[in-house]
């Protein structure tokens, strides 16, 4: 009888035995947090040079961790850049881009394809608890929501905060000059249910932060992945009462300073947790600042143009990485890196095999975080399905150029424009005539890339 009982209990234990990947993750792998801003400019943080926006918590994060000064998003607008981050693939490979519609809208029928693998799905294989708290913008129909793409929990808005604008709101820019919550009928969701409409955007950064802290505290015994894509500082700009009229930079500065507070809350929660020295945090943005909104848009610093363009200001992001005991305090990396690289980095840290049935555009950043070289040799700048430019080493070559929003069609350059980004980060001086061999070398890099650049069906045009 004892033998039968022992066999029964052993069977139950084996039936519920976690996978080897999950055991390894629990024992060795770090928690991973991605804080992802919306339309934050390269020059919008004090630690990246802004003279009047106070970001003490982000400055401390930089002092305790690493600044990455050559870090890129994969696209200059929301939907494609977010798809690239989560899948480690250029948007043209997963169809989350278009030459006709730049992002998904409330009337869009498409979304992130079912066969794409997200970071959350990778980490779930290793026993991670996963949460997405913030703006999603990868499809608002049920099959596209976070909870059907690897996340255990979702709290946030399904698309941009300027969508679902009501008909009787002020016309043109008037609604943005004095934004009111009621001007945009944006839904706030928890998992797959709408819990508030319109979302009270005056408290949304605060509530994202509270939910993030709650998630961290409730997952102390298992590895966790927290993806926190803030709605801000995308216009319309909102901040809570505690941050109203506090910044020397006005409303935009108020919004950034509340995001800075949010980062401080999250890092302090991690510092107080048992896994304080086993948590990797990235802070970056989906694309550059929306300059056409003037004082309500941010600053790309010395970089050219902003959101919507493939000039540096549209895709180079202010980026910080924090991991006490692993990343050297106060370190600076000038190595090429991309949001897409977080996919391979997280997979490597969780000891989860990368998908072999698709082309990935992701490289493990572990050597970079430890002060070493990057495996990434090139950055490809796409606008929709058009390859606009390439960076290789110090050099950036533009095949086509198009300003963010005031130039309706791209200009194709028979002789590509060439810039040395270390000497000329503002892309002012075309040196293609002085360096024909570099143009030839980068042309070969482009030709090699295009051999594998198979375009997937656009999800944005459905």
Image (cartoon, helix red, strand yellow):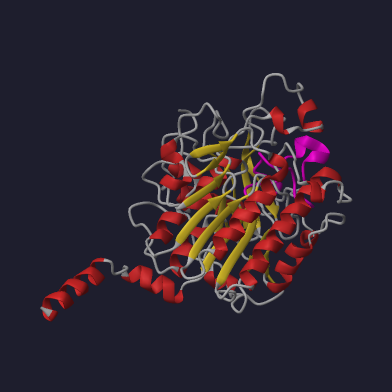
Residue 199 appears in the rendering: yes
Residue at the top extreme? Answer: 168
Measuring 67% from the left and 33% from the top, which residue is drawn there?
A: 162
For the N terminus, give its image quadrant. bottom left
Residue in front for this viewpoint, 96 or 175: 175
User: Could you say where residue 421 lies in the image, as x and y percent from the top left?
Assistant: 70, 56
Left or right: 295 as drawn, with respect to 418: right
User: Could you say where residue 381 lies in the image, as x and y percent from the top left?
Assistant: 58, 46
User: Could you say where residue 159 lies in the image, as x and y percent from the top left?
Assistant: 58, 37
Residue 408 placement: quadrant: top right
Magenta residues, start to end: 286-315
Measuring 54% from the left and 49% from the top, which residue is drawn there?
A: 443
Examine the rendered structure and indicate whether residue 224 appears above or below residue 2: above
Question: In the image, is residue 304 part of the stretch drawn in magenta?
Answer: yes
Left or right: 92 as drawn, with respect to 166: left
Residue in front for this viewpoint, 373 or 280: 280
Residue in front for this viewpoint, 458 or 137: 137
Residue 239 placement: quadrant: top right
Left or right: 240 as drawn, with respect to 96: right
**What kind of secondary structure does the magenta stretch mostly adopt?**
loop
Residue 335 placement: quadrant: bottom right
């Amino acid at each position: 009888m004892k033998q039968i009982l022992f066999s029964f209990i052993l069977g139950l234990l084996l039936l519920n035995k976690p996978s080897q990947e999950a055991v390894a993750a629990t024992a060795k792998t770090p928690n991973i947090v991605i804080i992802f801003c919306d339309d934050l400019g390269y020059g919008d943080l004090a630690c990246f040079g802004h003279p009047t926006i106070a970001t003490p918590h982000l400055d401390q994060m930089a002092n305790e961790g690493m600044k990455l000064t050559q870090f890129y998003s994969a696209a200059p607008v929301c939907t494609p850049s977010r798809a690239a981050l989560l899948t480690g693939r250029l948007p043209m490979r997963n169809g989350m881009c278009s030459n006709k519609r730049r992002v998904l809208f409330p009337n869009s029928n498409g979304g992130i394809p079912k066969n794409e693998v997200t970071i959350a799905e990778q980490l779930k294989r290793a026993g991670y608890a996963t949460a997405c708290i913030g703006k999603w913008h990868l499809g608002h129909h049920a099959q596209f929501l976070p909870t059907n793409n690897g996340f255990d929990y979702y709290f946030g808005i399904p698309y941009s905060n300027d969508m679902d604008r009501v008909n009787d709101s002020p016309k043109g820019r008037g609604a943005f000059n004095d934004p009111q919550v009621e001007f945009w009928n944006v839904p706030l969701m928890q998992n797959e249910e709408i819990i508030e409409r319109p979302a009270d955007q005056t408290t949304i950064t605060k509530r994202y932060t509270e939910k993030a802290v709650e998630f961290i505290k409730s997952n102390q015994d298992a590895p966790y992945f927290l993806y926190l894509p803030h709605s801000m500082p995308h216009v319309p700009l909102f901040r809570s009462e505690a941050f109203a009229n506090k910044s020397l930079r006005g409303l935009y500065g108020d919004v950034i300073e509340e995001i800075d507070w949010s980062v401080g809350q999250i890092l302090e929660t991690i510092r107080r947790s048992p896994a304080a020295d086993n948590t990797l945090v990235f802070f970056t943005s989906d694309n550059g600042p929306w300059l056409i909104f003037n004082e309500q848009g941010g600053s790309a610093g010395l970089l050219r143009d902003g959101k919507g363009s493939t000039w540096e200001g549209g895709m180079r992001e202010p980026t910080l990485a924090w991991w006490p005991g692993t990343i050297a305090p106060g370190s600076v990396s000038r190595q090429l890196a991309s949001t897409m690289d977080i996919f391979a980095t997280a997979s490597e840290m969780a000891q989860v095999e990368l998908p072999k049935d698709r082309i990935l555009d992701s490289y493990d950043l572990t050597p970079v975080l430890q002060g070493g070289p990057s495996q990434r040799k090139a950055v490809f700048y796409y606008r929709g399905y058009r390859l606009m430019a390439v960076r290789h080493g110090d050099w950036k070559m533009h095949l086509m150029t198009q300003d963010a929003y005031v130039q309706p069609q791209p200009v194709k350059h028979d002789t590509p424009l060439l810039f040395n980004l270390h000497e000329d980060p503002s892309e002012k001086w075309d040196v293609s005539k002085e360096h024909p061999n570099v143009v030839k070398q980068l042309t070969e890099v482009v030709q090699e890339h295009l051999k594998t650049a198979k375009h997937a069906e656009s999800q944005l045009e459905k």
